[in-house]
Amino acid sequence: MKVNSFKELIVWQKAIKLVNEIYSATKQMPKTEMYGLVSQMQRAAVAIPSNIAEGYRRNHQREFIQFLGIAMGSAAELETQVVISKEQYSNIDYFRAEALLEEVQKMLYSMIFKLKN
């Protein structure tokens, strides 16, 4: 099956859901975190589907793999920020965000592996 748009990629669709979960979670943080964890977490989350989309639109498979790797880096950054946030704000539930993040990371890893081989 040929994919005509990055919007058809399940990993991109799940990454968008992850962004929504992160925005919901960060809304629960105190206003003092607006330029700290809130900003960092939202930027890292948004970077994941953004890099998937940008890489898909590039002209070469090698570039797509590179952008998938950048998305993986943003996912690792977000994972770290979720750990920090959970320690600082134990009242915020990250269950769905963590499940989506893990799924997106596995899908990215699998895509990179398959495209390289």
Image (cartoon, rainbow, N blue to C red):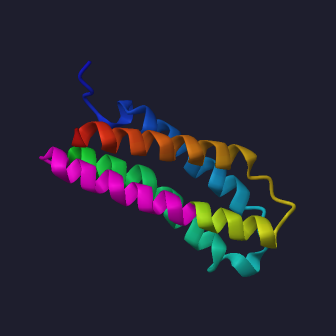
Is residue 14 visible in this depiction of the protein? yes
Is 9 contained in the magenta span? no
Q: Nearer the viewer, residue 36 or 31?
A: 36
Of the pair 38 and 1, the residue shown nearer to us: 1
Q: Is residue 57 above or below residue 2?
A: below
Residue at the image point whose x is 24% and y is 48% from the top: 64
The residue furthest right is 91
How many marks overall? Answer: 0
Residue 13 location (% of width, % of height):
47, 37
Q: Position of residue 63 (x, y in %)?
A: 19, 53
Between residue 29 and residue 82, name the one nearer to us: 82
Q: Identify the residue at image location x=70%, y=77%.
A: 33
Residue lying at the far front in this picture: please name it: 117
Query: Left or right: 46 with respect to 50?
Result: right
Q: Is residue 11 above or below residue 54?
A: above
The image position of residue 70, as x and y in percent, is: 36, 60
Q: Range of the magenta residues?
A: 58-78
Q: Quadrant of the C terminus?
A: top left
Residue closest to the far top: 1
Point 29% across, 36% down: residue: 114
- Residue at the location (74% across, 52% down)? 94
> Which quadrant: the N terminus?
top left
Let me know if residue 12 appears in the view: no
Q: Position of residue 5 (x, y in %)?
A: 28, 33
Snapshot quadrant of residue 116: top left
Which quadrant of the figure has residue 40?
Answer: bottom right
Residue at the limit of the structure toward the left, as seen here: 59
The answer to whether residue 59 is magenta is yes
In the image, taking residue 82 as reference, residue 110 lies left or right, namely left
